[in-house]
Amino acid sequence: MAKNKVKYNLKNAHYAMLKVDEEGVVSFDKPVALPGAVSISLDANGEPENFYADGTAYYVINNNMGYDGDLELAMIPEDFRVSALNETLDDNKVLIEDANSELNRFALLFEFDGDVKHIRHVLYNCSASRPGIEGKTNEESREVQTETLTIKATPLASGVVKAKTGNETDSTVYADWYKAVYMPTITGVNTDAE
């Protein structure tokens, strides 16, 4: 089977609102397109820590706290502002930002082109900070002004942080990636607890 050697070209960004019921069972709404993805840059959050005993690094503690970084979009869609950033539309359909609103959690899905096959990703437990306001006047030429969301992707209570397609991912799973948020099916991994 041919394998990707390189990746390039971020595209197909989607989000799906995360829900946790009273028993702690995690579910997601159907993914919604997040058009205009320009770039994504997420750094791993959390470094392994050594526990020292007997004069050596006796045990290494995994400290995977997810990812932090930025998602740059041509323009943040109104539906994302309402669903994830918890802005409200008033009676005149004007977006209102309220200092007392809580941010809502969501899964972030996206993909990169590969030289053989697209590489699809999902980060399960994301929140986005309010974007800044930035722009400038036109000069001799017009320049598109993008908007940036700062994303924090943390583990679910089960420990699951993210998933991505591999060289031999099941063709149905691959084809259905944006129809519903993929949940792992590994014996011994409980993804329902939040």
Image: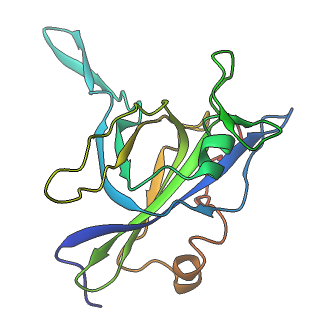
Image quadrant in which the N terminus is located: bottom left
Looking at the image, residue 88 lies above or below residue 119:
above
Looking at the image, residue 19 lies above or below residue 36:
above
In the image, taking residue 110 as reference, residue 41 lies left or right, namely: left
Q: Residue furthest bottom?
A: 1
Residue 70 at what x, y percent from top left? 34, 41
Residue at (48, 44) in percent of width and height: 161
- The answer to which image quadrant residue 193 occupies is top right
**Residue 194 visible to an observer of this rendering:** no
Question: As rendered, which of 106 and 174 lies closer to the eye?
Answer: 106
Question: As rendered, which of 43 and 51 lies closer to the eye?
Answer: 43
Looking at the image, residue 87 lies above or below residue 29:
above
Q: Residue furthest right?
A: 22
- The answer to which image quadrant residue 114 occupies is bottom left
Residue at (66, 23) in percent of width and height: 102
**Count of labels shown?**
0
Residue at (68, 15) in percent of width and height: 100
Question: As rendered, which of 9 and 184 lies closer to the eye?
Answer: 9
**Residue 147 visible to an observer of this rendering:** yes
Image quadrant in which the C terminus is located: top right
In the image, taking residue 129 as reference, residue 107 lies left or right, namely: right
Residue 192 at what x, y percent from top left? 71, 45
Residue 68 at what x, y percent from top left? 36, 34
Residue at (18, 8) in percent of width and height: 54
In the image, taking residue 9 as reference, residue 11 lies left or right, namely: right
Looking at the image, residue 170 lies above or below residue 110:
below
Residue 66 at what x, y percent from top left? 41, 36
In the image, taking residue 111 as reference, residue 94 lies left or right, namely: right
